[in-house]
Amino acid sequence: METCVFLSHELAEPLAGTAPTTRGWLLVEHPGPWAAKAVADSRGLDEGVGRELDRRAAKAGFRTALIRRPDDSATTPGGARAVYLAWTEPGATWLRRLDVRAADDLLELDLAALAGPTEPAFGDPAAGPLVLVCTNGKRDRCCAIEGRPLAGALAATFPGVTWEATHLGGHRFAPTAVVLPQGYLYGRLDPSAAHAVVAAARVGEMVPQWCRGRATYSRAGQAAELAVRAECGDRRADALSVYDERAEDDGGWTVRVDHIDGRTWMVAVDAHQEAPARPESCGKDEGLPTSMRARLLSHRQ
């Protein structure tokens, strides 16, 4: 049977503008097993804790994911769980780590107070970047088949920063990964591409070639930013910021993208249904996925 990954690749579905949208990330170490709805239903989390934590995090502006080391035995010492909080806004990215004894300890946190561009006093500053590879086969088998070998290959070179993660969206683009605290999502990675992504992140850059978008922005904003990067060639992660996204009557968007040097671009983004129909995830019915098509309208120095 043809997988969602095979069909997406063969039909050349665009990557730009397919990242999930969130400015904050809450990551909780949990070796597994992982359920399809991992945070809410995975065994080993106290009854109802994952579901409540997910609800509170979403309300505060964080996307929650469970993480584990590619080597299942390499867990945090002493039975503790590693917990990371990340914020992804350009010029205000931060990454903090705290080890907790149990997941329900996190229910004592005021996540709303921790959200935002001001770095909170949560745990300790964490050395970044982190790279998370989606490997949750219970959600989509392609993530396990494609993601686990990639996570293992990355961990061999970057053992301190590589984690497996439960769900990053876009199963059909597997292997998928997110780099934090930048917040850039990537798809269709092989080990060489993934190594290039991590190496770039270590010097404050991103790699447009395999990029799905910066989760900080809406899908239209992601596509607009990547279109400007293609035009200006600047790979510095925080060189561009998206402002003034405006919905138009025709169903599209006009997005302003600013460069730190003062240049500004106006970008038109249209939603386009990709044909022919195909499943957006293995096991789902066929549909027409929506891609974001961006075109530059103007450029001001």
Image (tube, rainbow, N blue to C red):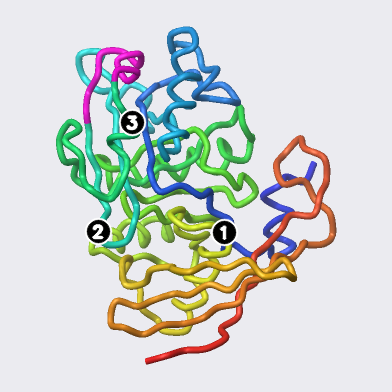
Q: Could you say whether the residue bearing mark 1 is in a helix, strand or loop?
A: helix
Q: Are marks 2 and 1 in contact (CB under 8 Å)?
A: no
> Do the CB atoms of the residues marked 3 and 2 lie less than 8 Å apart?
no
Q: Residues within 10 Å of mark 3 (few under 14, many from 20)?
A: some
Quarter of the image where one finds residue 71:
top left
Give left or right: position of 182 versus 44.
Answer: left
Question: Going 57% across and 39% down the picture, which residue do you hit?
Answer: 143
Magenta span contains residue 156? no
Look at the image and give the residue range highlighted in magenta: 98-108
Residue found at x 40% / y 40%: 152
Where in the figure is residue 284, as x and y percent of width and height? 77, 37
Precedes in sequence: disc 3 or disc 2? 3
Q: Nearer the viewer, residue 282 or 97?
A: 97
Could you tell whether 251 is left or right of 224 in the image?
A: right
Farthest top residue in view: 47
**Mark 2 crowdedness (10 Å alpha carbons): few <14, some 14-19, many ≥20:** few
In what element is the residue under mark 2? helix
The residue pinned by badge 2 equals 202
Residue 291 on image: x %, y % = 68, 62
Q: CA distance from mark 3 to mark 1?
A: 25 Å
Task: Mark 3 or mark 1: name the one nearer the start of the chain.
Answer: 3
Residue position marked by numbered label 1 in the rendering: 219
Outermost residue, bottom side = 301
Residue 151 position by quadrant? top left
Q: Which amino acid type is marked by label 2?
A: Arg
- Is residue 107 magenta-colored? yes
- The CA distance from mark 2 to mark 1 is 25 Å
Which numbered disc flags the more N-terminal residue, 2 or 1? 2
From the image, tell me which residue sits under label 3: 111
Quarter of the image with the C terminus in it: bottom left
Type of amino acid at the residue the image marks with label 1? Arg
Q: Nearer the viewer, residue 146 or 290?
A: 290
